[in-house]
Image (tube, helix red, strand yellow):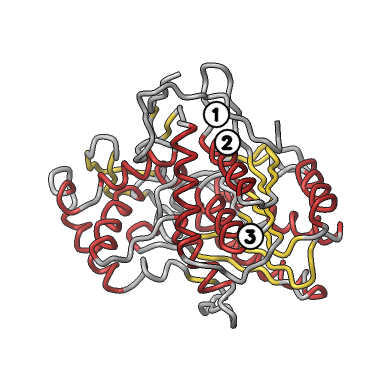
């Protein structure tokens, strides 16, 4: 079938298997071009199919020939209907890993569930014995709690008062005012349950109990802080409460792993175009201005550049892991440089529908958004028939 992007609001309903494969190949080539990283050889990535999780898996595998297990929850293809992009990404990753002689297996299911945790533990025991690194990169709007059976939904809301500021429809380029009503306590509580650190600790507790964590094992989860202009709807909003919980959980996990010399870190990453960030008011406009500024200074990074730098310069640099005053890894350091933020702040005051064409990088935003779904890559013939029925070898 000929596959074209079909948009509905902030999501694309189709994905291109060959485009997703090209995206994976491009990321692999980048990691290989940067040379070897003295990183772990046995790696589990929870949330491994897109964004930072996929980039982490690629960096581990092709930066140091690691065996990887990836856990994700993606929709497989049906005749005449494409899979989600994460499915095609994972199929392509396994194919490339196999060509390189690397172990790579995947599990498709609800990572919040006890069943998927046990399935993962069983696979580690059977194939790897133990793992040395766990990347926790889940990004889900809902969570079925494994103990209570209650379905919790996260909320993107400010806390305390109504939030009003600029946003952009990245499809049209129209800059408008948006207002978001404040959260109630239930919104905050649900968001913390979905996006906080409880499930991360459940993973490490279950794995330690099962004996599949190697001595000195490290686990890393991902967070975001961002600038003042997005803080009301992000870091000081419901999501920020969840991120605070996630970051506090890192210390709890480290305490629980002391007897095996283990350590938990939170890495604060750069603002990037993701399916999740595209749905958050204000963020697309901020990213458009940020991209323009960082590209002009030669500082722009995508997911794979961020994760390669995280592994090579922070986690496995041959010395101490550099941390901020709150004990976090800051790979958002270039984004948060004073000169970058001052420039973005100036542009923000100028931004409207007319000026954004010049002062922002809306084209870069749109391209990155299409790339998420396998569209817009050089070397892919989008007018040719594509096989939507791509399977993941370790799952099918």
The answer to whether residue 315 is above or below residue 318 is above
Which residue is identified by label 3?
65
- Cα distance, mark 2 to mark 3? 22 Å
Task: Place residue 187 in its image quadrant.
Answer: top right
In-image side of 337 versus 176 (left or right): right
Q: Nearer the viewer, mark 3 or mark 1?
A: 3
Which residue is identified by label 1?
83
Residue 186 seen = no
Number of the label disc, if any, that sits on residue 283: none
Q: Secondary structure at mark 2?
A: helix
| First in residue order: circle 2 vs circle 3 | 3
Task: Place residue 379 in its image quadrant.
Answer: top left
Residue 39 seen = yes
In the depicted view, which residue is nearer to us: 287 or 103? 103
Q: Is disc 3 surrounded by few (<14), some (14 to 19) or many (20+) residues within 10 Å?
A: many
Q: Secondary structure at mark 1?
A: loop
- Cα distance, mark 3 to mark 1? 28 Å
- Cα distance, mark 1 to mark 2? 6 Å
Q: Residue at x 70, y 45 (%)?
A: 105
Q: Is disc 1 surrounded by few (<14), some (14 to 19) or many (20+) residues within 10 Å?
A: many
| First in residue order: circle 3 vs circle 1 | 3
Number of the label disc, if any, that sits on residue 87: 2
Q: Contact (CB < 8 A) between labels 1 and 2?
A: yes
Q: Position of residue 49 (x, y in %)?
A: 57, 44
Q: Position of residue 316 (x, y in %)?
A: 59, 73
């Amino acid at each position: 079938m000929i596959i074209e992007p079909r948009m509905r609001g902030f999501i694309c309903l189709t994905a291109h298997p060959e485009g997703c494969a090209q995206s994976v190949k491009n990321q692999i080539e980048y990691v290989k071009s940067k040379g070897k990283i003295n990183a772990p050889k046995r790696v589990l990535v929870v949330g491994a199919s897109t964004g930072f999780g996929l980039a982490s898996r690629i960096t581990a595998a092709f930066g140091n020939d690691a065996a990887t297990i990836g856990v994700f929850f993606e929709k497989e293809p049906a005749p005449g209907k494409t899979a989600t992009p994460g499915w095609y990404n994972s199929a392509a990753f396994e194919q490339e890993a196999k060509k390189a002689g690397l172990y790579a297996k995947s599990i498709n299911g609800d990572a919040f569930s006890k069943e998927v945790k046990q399935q993962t533990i069983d696979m580690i025991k059977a194939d790897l014995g133990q793992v040395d690194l766990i990347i926790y990169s889940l990004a889900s709007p809902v969570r079925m709690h494994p103990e209570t059976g209650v379905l919790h939904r996260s909320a993107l809301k400010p806390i305390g008062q109504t939030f009003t500021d600029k946003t952009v429809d990245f499809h049209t380029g129209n800059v408008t005012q948006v207002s978001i009503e404040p959260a109630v306590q239930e919104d905050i509580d649900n968001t913390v349950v979905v996006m906080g650190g409880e499930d991360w600790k459940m993973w490490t507790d279950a794995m330690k109990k099962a004996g599949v964590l190697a001595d000195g094992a490290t686990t890393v989860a991902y967070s975001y802080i961002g600038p003042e202009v997005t803080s009301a709807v992000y870091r000081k909003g419901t999501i920020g409460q969840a991120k605070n919980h996630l970051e506090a959980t890192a210390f709890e996990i480290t305490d629980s792993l002391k007897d095996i010399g283990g350590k938990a870190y939170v890495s604060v990453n750069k603002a990037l175009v993701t399916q999740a960030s595209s749905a958050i008011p204000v963020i697309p406009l901020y990213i458009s201005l940020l991209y323009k500024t960082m590209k002009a200074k030669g500082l722009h990074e995508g997911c794979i550049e961020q994760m390669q730098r995280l592994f090579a310069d922070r986690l496995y640099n041959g010395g101490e892991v550099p941390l901020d005053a709150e004990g976090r890894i800051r790979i958002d350091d270039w984004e948060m440089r004073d000169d970058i933020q001052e420039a973005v702040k100036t542009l923000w005051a100028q931004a409207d529908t007319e000026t954004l064409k010049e002062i922002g990088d809306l084209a870069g935003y749109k391209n990155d958004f299409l790339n998420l779904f396998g569209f817009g890559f050089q070397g892919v013939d989008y007018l040719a028939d594509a096989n939507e029925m791509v399977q993941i070898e370790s799952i099918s």
